[in-house]
């Protein structure tokens, strides 16, 4: 059986789990290609106009492999941490895919709660039953998938004389086509990069607890907590926040970070299918030039302490 797994949204964080699980059941894995102009065009053509750019790109990934697989894995991710939720579009993603793209194969639709082994195994039983009814095979594949996921690490830690936090949803930060290869552009300018995975966990949680209300969204918790922690500990000279146009969660998180950091240098770059690379390059150039002048003239250098502690994957 051929199982299709689109390379969009949270594939960058959880692909070891999904691929190892279905491969453990004896399935052949069919991945879409990396995000490209062709993938984007396919997604824009079939997806609703109101969706954000990452969701449109996900539609393109799904459409590109729908004719090459017998089952398409579209994770309806509801929770990664208990009592917190992911973007609402994840909750309805299977229906969006089925009703937007004609000629779809069967699609996984069970809700996915990733905050405990028990709830995660329930998803595996529901989704794996399309391949086998053997609970022991599903259990074995599940254990292999957990092991693969727990050994998977993401994040960028490249500290230099001038270092910025590259913030944003992981499917924007780690998609070189979507973010116009901003990671390599920063490296070419000699700018160091830290991502949320390398913010000290205890410090991040401490900053989140200072909020007047407990975060409802997991992305809100991660991004605000990491940004505030790195700012307070003087690990960074500035923040570059990569955002998708019309993202409701980002509209809250960006204001929270700005309120907490005050006049600390922060550049917000919003992406949609019409974003031009020349405009992004110009803003990036101006921001990095400003950071260089600020460091050289005002001696605003962070003091690096012990090696930062990497946040583990929640699975």
Image (tube, grey):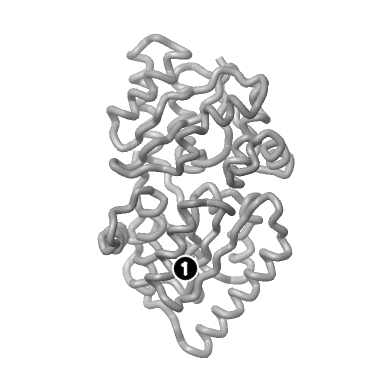
Q: Position of residue 277 (x, y in %)?
A: 71, 60
Crowding at mark 1 (Cα within 10 Å: few <14, some 14-19, many 20+): some
Residue at position x 32%, y 68% from top? 306
- In this rendering, the answer to whether 267 lies above or below 106 is below
Q: Nearer the viewer, residue 83 or 159?
A: 83
Residue at position x 35%, y 60% from top? 225
Q: Which residue is mark 1?
A: 159
SS of the residue at dot 1? loop
Q: Position of residue 25 (x, y in %)?
A: 45, 18
Apparent side of residue 78 relative to residue 47 in the rendered image (left or right): left
Q: Residue 141, located in which quarter of the rendered image?
A: top left
Total labels drawn: 1
Residue at position x 65%, y 21% from top? 68
Q: Nearer the viewer, residue 308 or 177?
A: 177
Farthest top residue in view: 133
Apparent side of residue 250 relative to residue 35 in the rendered image (left or right): left
Q: Nearer the viewer, residue 26 or 74?
A: 74
Q: Residue 105, located in which quarter of the rendered image?
A: top right
Farthest front residue in view: 50
Q: Position of residue 79 (x, y in %)?
A: 36, 38
Quadrant holding the N terminus = top right
Apparent side of residue 90 relative to residue 233 in the rendered image (left or right): right
- In this rendering, the answer to whether 130 lies above or below 183 is above
Residue at position x 59%, y 74% from top? 287
- In this rendering, the answer to whether 295 lies above or below 209 is below
Quadrant holding the C terminus = top left
């Amino acid at each position: 059986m051929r199982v299709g797994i689109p390379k969009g949204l949270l594939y960058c964080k959880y692909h070891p789990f999904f691929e190892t699980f279905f491969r453990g059941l004896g399935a052949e894995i069919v991945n879409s290609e990396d995000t490209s102009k062709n993938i984007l065009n396919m997604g824009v053509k079939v997806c609703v106009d109101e969706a954000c750019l990452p969701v449109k790109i996900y539609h393109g990934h799904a459409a590109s492999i729908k004719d090459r697989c017998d089952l398409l894995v579209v994770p309806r991710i509801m929770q990664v941490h208990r009592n917190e939720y992911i973007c609402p579009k994840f909750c309805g993603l299977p229906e969006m895919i089925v009703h937007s793209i004609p000629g779809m194969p069967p699609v996984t639709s069970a809700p996915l709660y990733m905050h405990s082994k028990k709830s995660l195994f329930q998803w595996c039983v529901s989704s794996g039953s399309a391949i086998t009814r053997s609970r022991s095979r599903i259990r074995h594949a599940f254990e292999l998938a957990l092991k693969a996921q727990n050994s998977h690490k993401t994040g960028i830690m490249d500290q230099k004389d001038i270092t910025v936090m590259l913030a944003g949803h992981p499917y924007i930060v780690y998609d070189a086509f979507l973010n116009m290869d901003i990671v390599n552009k920063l490296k070419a300018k000699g700018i160091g990069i830290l991502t949320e995975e390398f913010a000290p966990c205890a410090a991040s949680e401490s900053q989140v607890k200072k909020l007047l209300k407990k975060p409802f969204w997991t992305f809100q918790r991660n991004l605000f907590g990491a940004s505030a922690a790195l700012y307070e500990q003087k690990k960074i000279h500035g923040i570059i926040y990569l955002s998708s146009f019309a993202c409701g969660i980002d509209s809250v998180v960006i204001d929270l970070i700005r309120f907490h950091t005050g006049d600390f240098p922060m550049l917000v770059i919003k992406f949609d299918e019409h974003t031009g690379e020349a405009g992004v390059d110009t803003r990036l150039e101006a921001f990095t030039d400003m950071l260089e002048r600020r460091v050289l003239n005002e001696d605003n250098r962070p003091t690096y302490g012990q090696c930062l502690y990497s946040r583990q994957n929640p699975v």
